[in-house]
Amino acid sequence: MTALPLVFDAPKRGLPPRHLADLSAEGRREAVAALGEKPFRAAQLSNHYFGRLTVDPDAMTDIPAATRAALVADLMPPLFTEIRSVACDDGTTRKTLLKAHDGTLVESVLMRYPDRATLCISSQAGCGMACPFCATGQGGLQRNLSTAEIVDQVRRGAAAMRDGELPGGPGRLSNIVFMGMGEPLANYKRVIEAVHRICDPAPDGLGISQRSVTVSTVGLVPAIRKMTEEGLHVRLAVSLHTPDDELRNTLVPVNTRWDVAEVLEAARGYADKTGRRVSIEYALIRDINDQGWRADMLGKKLRKYLGPLVHVNLIPLNPTPGSKWDASPKPVEREFVRRVEAQGVTCTVRDTRGQEIAAACGQLAAEG
Ligand code: SAH
């Protein structure tokens, strides 16, 4: 596999010092040994971080104080301070603003449903993909997040659920979506490492099932192909937004590099390899991409390229600052769903949770 083009290789500037959560179990043992400590200390530390979800040295009473101080200083540099959390939907949606060691701001969103809890996490600070309807895209890319910065969002979300911080009492964080800020496949290596840390069974990782993790992409074809070879079972979501190249070139500018056909072929490769249905994300924008003929074309193309291994997720456009676009009227939305399904492709409409706290899809701008 060739290296990803340089244009997607965001600067390393600002990445935090290496952290326990950047390392595999093997890497953690080596790091502990390099400090002159017994390798089993790595398992103890991992148990605190991944198992008990804590970074508080005072809680690590199974490690002698002096050793603990040395281990924590080397392997658990502070990653984030929490700036604030805001909630809506009766407290069941909560957006958290985190500040990284270099002042970079990152957001994640926790959503509790009757049967599950989903955390939407960021893979980059900002985003370089420049989709005109997305607030994150309007701000540009600041930097990649480190593996540990990605994982730590999940650790915090899992602790919040365990501690019953959202209404409904203590619960379990069950699902992760890489649908916050950033293009995950433009930070490929760190995102794949993060998936391992998130999904490895505790205490080596946070123990969330790969099948409950979704990686969403604008369609970076070489990276989709590479991910196909990783042997993962995560769900792939593709932000398509229209089935035709002419409009997609403007809605998702990277389409000028890899067009709809190439993206759908790569998605098919992933679906075939994993047996998992690909999610097609489609933000429905009034009078832009919501025409009946486009729904027909979408259904036909998806049948052709993906057969039964596809599902369409319509996202009513969430408002973003300064955008002239808005969501399609409900009857147009219903007709769109009907016409996609008439082609034999399942199609559902995503809820617009978090809209009033700017926590919904495409609204994350991490303003301090
Ligand atoms: N960069 C990745 C991950 C972000 S996921 C990707 O694009 O897939 C965020 C999802 O919300 C994407 O499908 C994105 O296209 C969509 N989105 C962005 N802005 C939106 C808006 N204003 N309303 C609804 N969905 C939006």
Image (tube, rainbow, N blue to C red):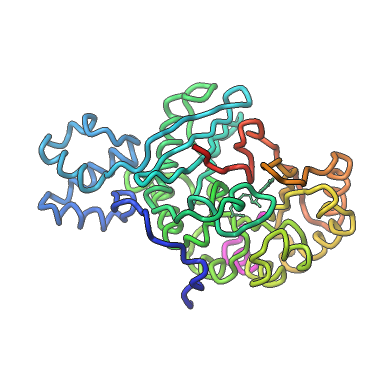
Q: Is residue 366 above or below residue 293?
A: above
Q: Is residue 166 above or below residue 263?
A: above
Q: Residue at x 78, y 55 (%)?
A: 345
Magenta stretch in the rendered image: 268-279
| Residue 9 is a magenta residue | no
| Residue 269 is a magenta residue | yes
Q: Position of residue 261 (x, y in %)?
A: 72, 71
Q: Given the current orientation, which residue lies at the most extreme front position?
A: 322
Seen from the viewer's position, the closer of residues 284 and 314 is 284
Q: Position of residue 360 (x, y in %)?
A: 63, 39
Seen from the viewer's position, the closer of residues 316 and 346 is 316
Query: For the image shown, how many numbered marks are present on the structure?
Result: 0
Seen from the viewer's position, the closer of residues 143 and 204 is 143
Q: Position of residue 137 (x, y in %)?
A: 60, 53
Q: Is residue 74 visible?
A: yes
Q: Residue at x 33, y 53 (%)?
A: 22
Horizontal side, residue 16 vs residue 329: left or right: left
Q: Residue at x 64, y 66 (%)?
A: 254
Q: Quadrant of residue 120?
A: top right
Q: Is residue 277 visible?
A: no
Q: Residue at x 46, y 24 (%)?
A: 164
Q: Position of residue 90 (x, y in %)?
A: 61, 22
Seen from the viewer's position, the closer of residues 168 and 120 is 120
